[in-house]
Image: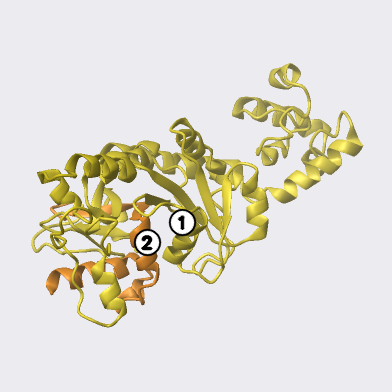
Chain colours: A orange, B yellow
């Protein structure tokens, strides 16, 4: 691939158990149209980094 | 009779998944390409294809007939299909083994005395999100693990405790029956995908159990003989199912839970094991593994979930091809 720094998802996630409990209680993110639940985590993370 | 058929007892492959190859083979026991071809050549003049389709009809017609029919009905796809899938998956997992690395998605505080992720709870309340990059300094207990690293009265003890705890993890494979995209899709524990044997074997070597979180009773029955099964509610999304499974398994808070997706049962075990060292050192609350894409077709497929890493090494994801570089040509 020419210069595209893209990575393929390897089908595995890790959660801290404690985080998992809070994460499961999160409302769906605005951008979850792609049926990617991890966007919820990212939305949280991005929102957290932007603020 | 071919050489192979003479050497092997008739019906020796009754428990194998190669029933379809018996079609055209009156002996019903040869499985290699060579012997199959020669058996077909031998069978053409003496038997019709319909009769030849009945496996092992030469020896004990009644019993083997029933067995053969049952087998034929249960085999949904030919063997080469499974072989191919497995080969592709093995190849991919081999790549994953070499190249894949864990990347953080969210980082935060791991201290048991403080709320782990202030961001998530404040977002849930509708407030402004902020992850604690550093927890407030407290004297004595309730210190941040980062503080512990730098020193302090309880630093070594805390550090050891956290090292121990964060090194532990539970492997959970969600096997959801009511799947949105593929309703009733093959379970990761089904024989089609080697029954999760590779995963189980590698984890057993490291004295970890593989837990299957499922919502289907049939699936539970099937998986129960080989895996530890956790029954969860069927109206959960993935994370909720995991959370419920973790709760049912009574996982301690500091522990991590590694979620192996159901369509990746042949994932490189070393990658899972690598979480141990990564999880020890990193402060990520939620991590994922990824490897570089080398094939243009893969890069363009909407079925492939991609990650893009930002300058700080954080991952963000999409199904869409990312970042068109002007002047670059996809090979």
Spatial distance from mark 1 to mark 2, Cα to Cα?
A: 9 Å
Q: Quadrant of the N terminus of chain B?
A: top right
Dividing the picture into quadrants, the one containing residue B32 is top right
| Residue at the spot 15% in from the left edge and 50% down from the top edge | B146
The label shown at residue A20 is 2
In which chain is the residue bearing label 2? A
Residues indicated by labels 1 and 2 sit on the same polypeptide chain: no
Dividing the picture into quadrants, the one containing residue B158 is top left
Out of B3 and B44, give the one closest to the viewer: B3
| Residue at the spot 73% in from the left edge and 37% down from the top edge | B24
CB-based contact (under 8 Å), mark 1 and mark 2: yes
Residue that label 1 marks: B246
Dividing the picture into quadrants, the one containing residue B215 is bottom right
Quick check: can you spot residue B130?
A: yes
| Residue at the spot 25% in from the left edge and 62% down from the top edge | B114
The label shown at residue B169 is none
Out of B232 and B46, give the one closest to the viewer: B232
């Amino acid at each position: 691939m020419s210069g595209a720094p893209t990575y393929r998802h390897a089908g595995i996630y890790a959660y801290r158990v404690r985080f998992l409990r809070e994460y499961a209680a999160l409302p769906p993110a605005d951008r979850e149209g792609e049926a990617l639940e991890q966007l919820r985590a990212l939305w949280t993370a991005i929102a957290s980094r932007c603020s | 009779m071919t050489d192979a058929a003479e050497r092997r007892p008739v019906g020796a492959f009754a428990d194998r998944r190669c029933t379809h190859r018996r079609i055209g083979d009156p002996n019903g026991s040869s499985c290699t390409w060579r012997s199959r071809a020669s058996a077909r050549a031998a069978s053409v003049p003496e038997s019709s294809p319909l009769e030849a389709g009945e496996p092992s009809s030469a020896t004990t017609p009644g019993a083997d007939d029933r067995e053969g029919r049952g087998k034929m009905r249960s085999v949904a796809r030919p063997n080469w299909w499974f072989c191919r899938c497995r080969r592709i998956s093995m190849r991919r997992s081999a790549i994953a083994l070499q190249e894949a690395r864990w990347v953080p998605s969210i980082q935060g505080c791991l201290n048991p005395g403080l709320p782990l992720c202030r961001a998530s709870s404040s977002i849930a309340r509708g407030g402004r999100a902020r992850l604690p990059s550093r927890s407030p300094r407290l004297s004595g207990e309730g210190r941040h693990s980062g503080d512990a690293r730098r020193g302090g009265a309880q630093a070594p003890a805390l550090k050891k405790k956290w090292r121990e705890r964060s090194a532990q993890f539970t492997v959970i494979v969600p096997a959801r029956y009511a799947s949105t995209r593929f309703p009733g899709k093959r379970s990761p524990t089904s024989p089609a995908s080697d029954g999760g044997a590779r995963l189980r074997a590698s984890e057993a070597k490291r004295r970890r159990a593989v837990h299957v979180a499922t919502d289907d009773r049939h699936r539970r029955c099937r998986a129960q003989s080989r895996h530890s099964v956790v029954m969860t509610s069927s109206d959960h999304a993935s994370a909720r199912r995991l959370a419920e499974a973790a709760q049912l398994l009574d996982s301690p808070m500091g522990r991590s839970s590694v979620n192996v997706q159901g369509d990746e049962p042949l994932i490189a075990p070393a990658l899972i094991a690598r979480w141990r060292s990564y999880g020890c050192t990193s402060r990520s609350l939620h991590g994922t593994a990824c490897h570089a894409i080398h094939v243009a077709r893969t890069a363009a497929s909407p079925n492939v979930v991609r990650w893009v890493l930002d300058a700080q090494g954080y991952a963000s994801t999409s199904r869409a091809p990312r970042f068109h570089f002007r002047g670059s040509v996809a090979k």
